[in-house]
Amino acid sequence: MDLPFHVLIISSLIKIVVVVHLLLIGVMAMILAERKVSGWIQNRHGPNRVGPWGILQPIADGVKFLLKEDLVPDHVDKPIYLLAPAIILVPALVTCGVVPFGSSITISGYEIPLQIADINIGVLYILAITSLGVYGVVLGAWASNNKYSLLGGLRSSAQMISYELTLGLSLIGVLMLSSSLSLRENAIQQGRYPWT
């Protein structure tokens, strides 16, 4: 049975909030693990020695981050300079909307898929959206109004574009075997085999 519009909107909003929070908590956990290992390797005080298992370290980092002063140099193009990091972050978060996190659940007789948007061209969508991050790098470099930053940004964008080419080529084998661009269909087909 198809979902009513209000159930579709509410379930989509809940899924968006859950996915974004899971991603941000995952990033927090990876940063904590990295700082624990680097503190252990460098034999210094850090999350490996301070507090209960270093759990309070991300909270301290968050407080420090919120209390920092936001300095913007005078010679930069301010709107683009401030917008460039968001142009890099938003495509990275938006691509998770088409990733299936499971099959589906049934609530009050409605079958709700564990995927924000089931697009039948999900693989092409991910390739297209992730390529938008290049614009954030180029705009950030250009907005800094510095020729060396611009050269570095153009170099980074060229590297990102070359990585996208190899990423697209590496997906060809999977797409040929599954004969579908839908990530949901690909996940269902991979579920048949225990080694994938």
Image (tube, grey):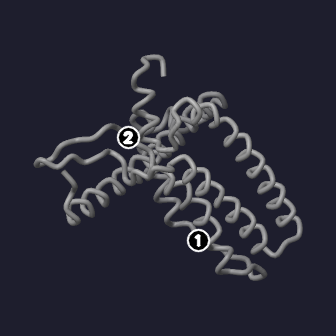
The mark nearer the N terminus, 1 or 2, is 1
Q: Is residue 111 left or right of residue 73?
A: left
Q: Secondary structure at mark 1?
A: loop
- Give the mark toward the camera: 1 or 2: 2
Distance of label 1 from label 2 (alpha carbons): 38 Å
Query: Measured along the vertical axis of the image, is residue 194 above or below residue 84?
Result: above
In this view, the residue in front, 132 or 184, is 184
What residue appears at the point 78 percent right and 81 percent down from the top-left corner? 75
The front one of 17 and 39 is 17
What percent of the width, then of the height, locates residue 139? 72, 70
The residue that appears at 57% across and 38% down in the rendered structure is 35
User: Relative to the observer, which residue lies in front, 52 or 82?
Assistant: 82
Which of the 4 image quarters holds residue 176?
top right
* Residue wearing tag 2: 101
Q: Which residue is outermost to the top?
A: 195
Please tell me which residue is depicted at 62% across the width and 34% down the height of the picture.
38
The answer to whether residue 85 is above or below residue 104 is below
Residue 58 circle label: none
Q: Secondary structure at mark 2?
A: loop
Give the residue drawn at x 77%, y 67%: 141
Q: Which residue is tagged 1?
A: 69
Q: Position of residue 119 (x, y in %)?
A: 44, 52
The amino acid marked with disc number 1 is: Glu
For the image, the number of numbered tags is 2
